Amino acid sequence: MARYAMVIDTKRCVGCHACVITCYMENNVPEGFTRDWIVEVVEGEFPDLRSEIRTERCNHCENPPCVFVCPCGASYKDKDTGIVLVHHDKCSGCKACIAACPYDARFINPIGYADKCTFCDHRVKLGKTTACAQTCPTSAINFGNLDDPASKLHKLMNGRIVKTMKPEAGTGPNIFYLL
Amino acid sequence: MTEVTSFRNNPLIDPHLEIWEWQIPGYLFLGGLVAGLMILNGVWRLFYSDKEGRSITRNGAVAAPVLLSLGMFLLFLDLSYKIHVFRFYTTFNPASPMSWGSWILLLVYPVQILTLALPGGIERFGWRFSFLNPLWDKIKIYAERYNVAVSTSNIVLGIGLGIYTGILLAVNAARPLWNVSLLGPLFLVSGLSAASAWNLLARPNDAEKKLLVRWDIGLLGIELIFLMLIIIELSTGPIGKQAAAGLFLGGNYTASFWVFIVGLGILLPLWLEIREAIGRYVPHWLGPLLVLGGGLALRIVFVYAGQISSMPEITLFR
């Protein structure tokens, strides 16, 4: 099984929202909802301030609580890619997965099923990168297979401080942020 | 100073979760109540078989499937993809409490029908449903033959159902308020207490009344201890749990927690029932009614407050 992951360079991200817009277009995201979003953090006391801009989405966890709690077997981890996906035709809209997700990455699609980032699995199957990674004008978003030793993700993380979101949740996120 | 600005604004998710509304507390309350009714019925039949029952063995047993159906209807109302409700029964996910719960609910109905067919339950149907009597006679023979098994099933399934209503919330590590080990036992004890109160309102005979009041005093005491232990667990836990405890200790849900759950739902009925047990006059309906209201308040407050509590982002830059 491949282990698809994303490495996001917070020093490159300028918060332009291009990833958000391209996701709308690529995945036909319903109006008023979003599968990825920008977060800006400012920390410290003036004038000693530090800021971070990053793009967030489903972390496609190694240990996904949304998959464990799903009573209908609709949420699953794809055997070939490791991407966490939702079978729309199996979902009953019970919202257990939304309650279980520490990242609040899911939402209820107006049709009724649980919706979220798919790592553009339809593109990945064709050997392409995700739409957000392809669009990012500063190359802050990088997508690849962590199980591939030649993947650029390893090179990007080498020598940088790397963090994942809410590691204490024990979910094993597959989105890595470079500080 | 840390300022986090998120541009996400998904309905029902931001600024905090609002995915579960009144239907879920209603379902959890009715599920707990039915679990309690089943356990009390089983215990009465197994350990108090020398005493005649009325409220527990008949009135409570008749109410249980009706209340459970109402609860399941509330659960159905909560689903956002209602046409796919059958999907609960096309798979079984052993890691999912909701999956366990939906299958337990399915097992509960046949046991409740067999329970009603036991002596002291429903003897015969009236003229409107008299066409059911030949079949009912056969069910009665079967139920009586397996009397002990049916009563034991009531206790086992009741415990499973009652604990499940709490575990359903407790498995969510993402919501620190729910993620406490005692939530399942708390909801089970609260369900038993609510069932005692229900039976006290359902015309119990003297023997039943005496025991139910004693049981309820004990159950309310245990519920109070569990609640305090949960507050201790939360306030001495990691930062997310401390913030969750803060919701009850000065935060948004302080008044509703202490007034409706602890005060009106536990302490006042406890005092009333102790007075009743020592022979003082109290309106017989007041204590049980407060207990039922407290049980509902417990679920409402926990379901809503739990959706506000979330794991904080502890380290931002390192």
Image (tube, rainbow, N blue to C red):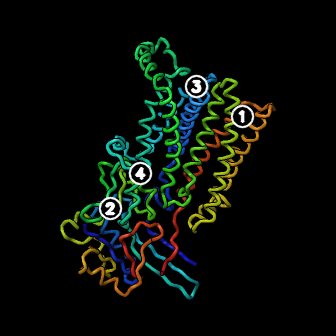
Q: Is residue B14 left or right of residue A140?
A: right
Name the amino acid type tagged 2. Answer: Val
Q: Residue at x 60, y 39 (%)?
A: B192
Q: CA distance from mark 2 to mark 1?
A: 52 Å
User: Of residues A68 and A44, which is closer to you in this image?
Assistant: A68
Residue B9 in view (yes/no): no
Name which of mark 4 and mark 1 comes first in the sequence.
Answer: 4
User: Of residues B263 and B203, which is closer to you in this image?
Assistant: B203
Q: Secondary structure beneath disc 2?
A: strand
Point out which mark residue B59 bears: 3
Circle 2 residue: A84
Circle 1 residue: B286
Tell me the crowding category of disc 2: few under 14, some 14 to 19, or many 20 or more residues within 10 angstroms, Cα based.
many
Tell me the crowding category of disc 4: few under 14, some 14 to 19, or many 20 or more residues within 10 angstroms, Cα based.
many
Q: Secondary structure beneath disc 3?
A: helix
Q: Residue at x 54, y 45 (%)?
A: B25
Mark 4 or 1: the one toward you: 4
Name which of mark 4 and mark 3 comes first in the sequence.
Answer: 3
Circle 4 residue: B96
Mark 4 or 2: the one toward you: 4
Q: Are marks 4 and 3 in contact (CB under 8 Å)?
A: no
Q: CA distance from mark 4 to mark 1?
A: 39 Å
Picture coordinates of residue B74, whole percent (x, y): 48, 40
